[in-house]
Amino acid sequence: MTKNQIHEWHERIEDGRKQYIRAYWNSREWQFQVAHPDGEKWLLLEQPGPERWLELRDLLFRKYQRKKLPWKYVEELDKMLEIRGIRENEPAKDEE
């Protein structure tokens, strides 16, 4: 990936409120941030879990399908996930 990118999505947290997640590529690494609608600023996630990485991968793939993003970005993220030992569709430890 050669240029800076920002990708955002949201999810519902346990109390029913939305939580916004931002993944920022700064030409060297991904940084994840979280914000709540009632909060004023984005908080940096120091150690994002595998679920955040897979959410980002899903988001990039869907953007690729809509022709909003080149396939090489998805491939490069897949390489990063492989290095980190994160795989798609892997059952959770509780399910084994």
Image (tube, rainbow, N blue to C red):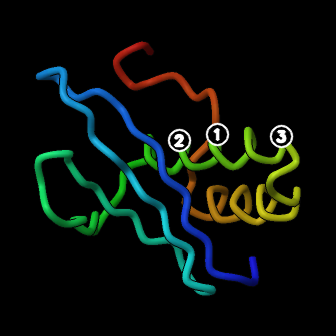
Measured in 3D between alpha carbons, the distance from the residue under mark 1 to the one under mark 3, in whole angstroms, is 13 Å
**Which residue in the structure is indicated by mark 3?**
66
**Which residue in the structure is indicated by mark 2?**
55
Which of the 4 quarters of the picture holds residue 43? Answer: bottom left
- In the displayed structure, does residue 75 sit left or right of residue 90? right
**Which residue in the structure is indicated by mark 1?**
58
Q: Residues within 10 Å of mark 1 (few under 14, many from 20)?
A: some
**Residue 52: x percent and y percent?**
44, 47
Identity of the amino acid at label 2?
Glu
Measured in 3D between alpha carbons, the distance from the residue under mark 1 to the one under mark 2, in whole angstroms, is 5 Å
Asked if disc 1 and disc 2 are in contact, CB closer than 8 Å, the reply is yes
**Residue 78: x percent and y percent?**
72, 55
- In the displayed structure, does residue 64 sit left or right of residue 24? right
Along the viewing direction, whichever of 92 and 47 lies nearer the viewer: 47
| Residue at position x 34%, y 18% in the image | 94
Which of the 4 quarters of the picture holds residue 39? Answer: bottom left
- In the displayed structure, does residue 1 sit left or right of residue 51? right
Along the viewing direction, whichever of 31 and 85 lies nearer the viewer: 31
**Residue 73: x percent and y percent?**
78, 63
- Of the two numbered discs 3 and 2 in the rendering, the one whose residue sits closer to the viewer: 3
- In the displayed structure, does residue 14 sit left or right of residue 95? left
Identity of the amino acid at label 1?
Asp
Going from N to C along the chain, the mark reached first, 3 or 2, is 2
